[in-house]
Amino acid sequence: MTCVRSEYVDFWFDSIHCHRTADKRSDNEHFDPPILLVFTGKDKYATEALFKKREQELNDQIDTVLGLKSKYHHMHKKFYLSNFKGTDEEFEKLRYEIYRAAKNMDNWGKAFPLKWILLEHLIEINKNDGKNFINFTDMSKLAKHPDINILNEDDLLLFLRFQHNVGNIIFFEDIRDLIILNPQWLADAFRCLVSDRLDNSRLHHLEDWTLFTRQGKISESLITELFKAKDEKNKPSKEDVQDQISVKTNLPVSVTLRQQLNIKKSTNENLFITSCIKTGNTLVFTDCNNNRLIICNSDGTDIHHIPLSYKPHYITEIDSNTVAVSCLYDKTILIINISTRSITSTINTSGYCHGISYNDNNLYVVIDRSIIHVMDLTGKVIRTIPLPSNYIYDITVDRDRLVCIDITSIYCCSLDGKVIWQFEKDEFQDLTRVTTDNEGNVYVTNEKTHTVIVVSDDGKHHRELLTESDGLDEPRGIYFDKKENVLLVCNERDGNAFLFDVIKKLT
């Protein structure tokens, strides 16, 4: 029974209070839902006198925090227990009190339509699949499932009001298009703005973050990022994910290691490999630490370097002999002939140039993480494309689609920037590079979890394709060779690179 952190208790009671089923208190002066406060660690106090002293301290702290606030009326009882020495009688009292509190709630024992139970179950499936909110149109589609058959809008609204009243969802009729399926997700999101234990080291280099911490000013883009900072949930295993994919998709069935190689020439080399491509039998890597390209055969032989005057970060293939490299902080794109090992032209950009992709005789370049410049090989900007986030790092363009990523999300867009779908999961917190295959499936490296994830071309299905057990250690560069169905992945520090044969699902 440690010291009560007043701001956390206050916030927790606020979270419960927003789910109250009525604005007026009941005859016994309580709000629903009820709160039973359980303290553990009673065994740490050697004598009854020491325990009573600590009990009084805790009661005083709770009264100080909540005593004059209406939300205190959710409190029904307090229990002080020991997980090690507690008696069966003490735990039985707790079990009975939980039963009694639930039984006294207004909705206890009421009959509800069976279709409500089925729809509630379908909502739970979506929540367990990581979906935290939904709009009214999509909720209506769920309700019209043949096994549920809620067709009337008023019937659906009645169901949603009830689910809101019992705290299963958050729903307000004046903002129908934001139905919160997981109330805890919303509470966690707000906690990102008020907690003094917030750890968002990936944001600390941003100017917005400095203004937030020093002056309390918070921008819209930073709010968006902070709202993504929810507690990481337990991930299912690779086998569990594979078992869940029961619908027909074009996702690969498996990958088989074709070749593992190491591009270090000596153990003293301090590499930082930021991206890679495969063109024919040639592999090309950008080594940001050493201002160079590393080139070798696909079996790891004939390793040689092309020195550069700038730090290369992103690379794209123009043809079998030519690549374009974006040098982020130098605001420069280099066109390089890898056969002659020479720079054929240099393009200066108007801002920091991040991800780069070549398609249909044009370069697509992310500028300052918020816009794409479409340019020809002379650097002439033909048009611009807005991006769905202010933190876009990498892109790939294939035919009529543009796929881009920020740290936590994958966006599939049309070539005019309209979002077709967005994919986001709580466990994806450090996405780094992206590529696509012939079917439009999307492959991304997740540096933090040492994995490669593949997402279906419609954004509806995903699976963990490669993990640490496959040799991945902070993987960054990734490239799909569409001619050979081969996936190239490289670790950023140890020099290890991998070629995997991708086996597609039979149709």
Image (cartoon, helix red, strand yellow):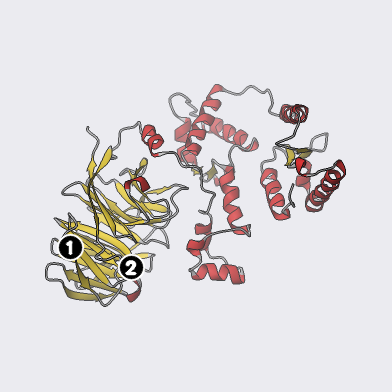
* Residue 262 visible to an observer of this rendering: yes
Disc 1 marks which residue?
318
Q: How many other residues sit within 10 Å of disc 1, few (<14), some (14-19) or many (≥20)?
A: many
Quadrant housing the C terminus: top left
Labelled pair 2, 1 in contact (Cβ < 8 Å): no
Residue 163 placed where, x, y %? 60, 35
Q: At x 15% / y 71%, what residue is drawn?
A: 341
Give above or below for 193 relative to 131: below
Q: At x 19% / y 49%, what residue is drawn?
A: 482
Of 458 and 429, nearer the camera is 429
Going by the numbered disc 1, the residue's amino acid type is: Ile
Give above or below for 346 relative to 456: below
Disc 2 marks which residue?
270
Residue 274 placed where, x, y %? 32, 63
Q: Looking at the rendering, which quadrant does residue 385 occupy?
A: bottom left
Of 445 and 367, nearer the camera is 445
Residue 291 placed where, x, y %? 28, 73
Numbered disc 2: secondary structure: loop
Of 457 and 260, nearer the camera is 260
